[in-house]
Amino acid sequence: MFWLDFSCKNYLIIYDLVKTTAIIPFIKTDHAAISLELVNNSNEIKGPGLWKMNCSLLDHRDYVNDILEKIPICLSEGRKELSDSRSIWDWLKYNIRAHTILHSKRRAQERKEREQNLQEVYAKAKFNSKQTLMTKMLIIILNSAKETLELFYEEKVKGIIIHARAHWHEHGEKSTKYFFNLE
């Protein structure tokens, strides 16, 4: 057992903080990753934090079309309620920001679900490959699941590189730990 919080008299066993554990098959290696989720016992109330626009949303046609449809509606609402053009402009920016935040949260949830599904497919294929003899079909399924997961993680790393504002990333060099620490 490990002990935490040596500065206080209230010693806590790490076992008491564990919410879930899992062993996850990991791509690019024959080792498995261990996932450990801890319970947060602090009762701190956190604010919404700082929001920054993800400019990659502008590459998605569905988001751009939604905004283009929303602009005339927000302008007409603003003109009904407000008389000052600066207030109308702020009203428009507020509505676009609110819509963008909701859209981003929805996309993040979809990405999270997709990642979980891809991990489950890969874990199932890895498990099946260990349980039975490797047939051509199992090999194809395993390799396909692995490639799909690798592509997903490459896209995720591109986002991390952009968030870290790293200007010196070279193609082929995968220093993801470095970029995670920058972010």
Image (cartoon, rainbow, N blue to C red):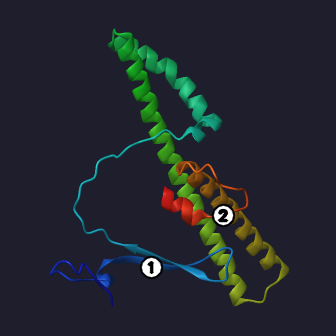
Residue extending farthest top: 83
Q: Please identify the quarter of the rendering in which residue 31 is found.
A: bottom right
Image location of residue 10, percent across then percent down: 17, 80
State the residue position of label 1: 21
Image location of residue 21, percent across then percent down: 44, 79
Q: Which residue is rendered at x = 79% and y = 78% of the image?
A: 139
Q: Which residue is rendered at x = 50% and y = 47% of the image?
A: 106
- Under circle 1, the secondary element is strand
Q: Is residue 105 left or right of residue 138?
A: left
Give the quarter of the figure containing the N terminus: bottom left
What amino acid type is highlighted by mark number 1? Thr
What amino acid type is highlighted by mark number 2? Lys
**Between 118 and 8, the one nearer to me in the picture:** 8
Image location of residue 153, percent across then percent down: 63, 61
Residue extending farthest right: 136
Q: Please identify the quarter of the rendering in which residue 178 is found.
A: bottom right
Q: In this view, does 81 lie to the left or right of 124?
A: left
Real-space Cα separation, disc 2 to disc 1, in angstroms: 27 Å
> Compared with residue 113, is residue 119 higher up or lower down, i.e. above or below?
below
Image location of residue 24, percent across then percent down: 56, 77
Q: Which residue is rendered at x = 22% and y = 62% of the image?
A: 43
State the residue position of label 2: 174
> Compared with residue 99, is residue 16 higher up or lower down, i.e. above or below?
below
> Compared with residue 98, is residue 144 higher up or lower down, i.e. above or below?
below
Q: Is residue 130 left or right of residue 79?
A: right
Counting residues from the start of the chain, the first of labels 2 and 1 encountered is 1
- For label 2, the crowd category at 10 Å Cα-Cα, with few meaning under 14, some 14 to 19 and many 20 or more, is few
